Image (cartoon, rainbow, N blue to C red):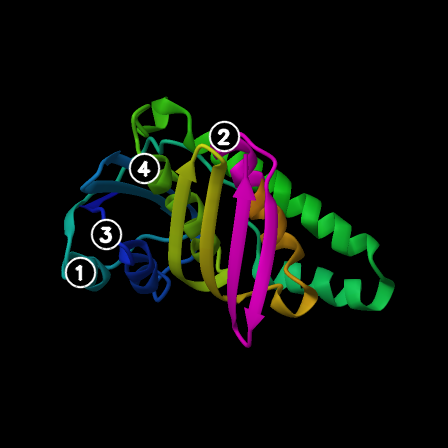
Amino acid sequence: MIKTANRRGMLHEITGVIKDYASIEWVFVSIPSETERVIAMRLSDSLPISALDKLKSINGIYDIWASHEAPMELVGFDKEILRSILMHMVQSGGEIHAFLTKLGYEMGLSMASTMLRTKYEIPSNAAMNKVLETAINMLVVMNLVRGIEDIVMNSDKNGYSVNISLLEPFDLDAGLPFTRGYLLGLMKVLLKCDCNLDAVINKTRVNIYIKGK
């Protein structure tokens, strides 16, 4: 368990250190306040003192402690397994493409639904853009996206609009079936709407535009 400041890039910095020493089996990020995050992780092995020292040197980390009672468990996906599915998709046609879209969608539904359970420390008055940002950042934690450059959410009487900039999603060359499904699943739960999603690809960067009512 790691108590940190609520700032952009913190989760990426923390997982960058830990992945040098252990595999990350799951991660959960709660947002107890506008200024604070609590990150719970289950690792494949314990961390040496040198790793803890590196974590403590990250600007914004307040405390690190071990917990025998994790707040929740999340099932992630191995990128190489998904890549092998994509390879099969290229060879066999569109059915696997639809399967990956559905797989991503169900993962997004599950992730968002779990995060909204208040017993896992996300308060009922938490800003929705912060909850959404955390859910989208799980793609980085699961190693399915190299990075997220920007997330902007706006709402008015006409509905919602969300703009997301992703770096190197794993399914980029296949048309983003899993990534699209995951994001639409998140929006179904978090924004309570069926959204339209458009993606503009510029080499390894993907700009995604989502609109819903």
Q: CA distance from mark 2 to mark 4?
A: 13 Å
Residue 92: give x, y in percent of width and height. Answer: 86, 63
Which residue does the numbered mark 4 point to in the structure image?
Answer: 30
Q: CA distance from mark 4 to mark 1?
A: 19 Å
- Answer above or below: position of 145 versus 6: below
Q: Say the numbered circle drawn on residue 90.
A: none
Question: Which residue corresponds to the image point at 22% horizontal and 46% vertical from the top-left?
Answer: 6
Which residue does the numbered mark 3 point to in the structure image?
Answer: 7
Whether the residues at callouts 3 and 4 have beta carbons within 8 Å, the answer is: no
Q: Is residue 208 left or right of residue 120?
A: right
**For the residue labelled by badge 1, is the local secondary structure a helix, a strand or a loop?**
loop
- Answer above or below: position of 73 versus 125: below
Which residue does the numbered mark 1 point to in the structure image?
Answer: 58
Which residue does the numbered mark 2 point to in the structure image?
Answer: 113
Disc 3 residue type (three-letter): Arg
**Region of the chain picked out in magenta, as a range:** 185-213
Nearer to us: label 1 or label 3 = 3
Q: Earlier in the sequence, mark 2 or mark 4?
A: 4
Question: Which residue corresponds to the image point at 38% horizontal and 51% vertical from the top-left?
Answer: 152
Q: Nearer the viewer, residue 207 or 132?
A: 207
Q: Is residue 206 magenta?
A: yes
Q: CA distance from mark 3 to mark 2?
A: 23 Å
**For the residue labelled by badge 2, is the local secondary structure a helix, a strand or a loop?**
helix
Quadrant of res 3: top left
Residue 77: give x, y in percent of width and height. Answer: 57, 51
Question: Which residue corresponds to the image point at 47% horizontal and 45% vertical from the top-left?
Answer: 161
Nearer to us: label 3 or label 4 = 3
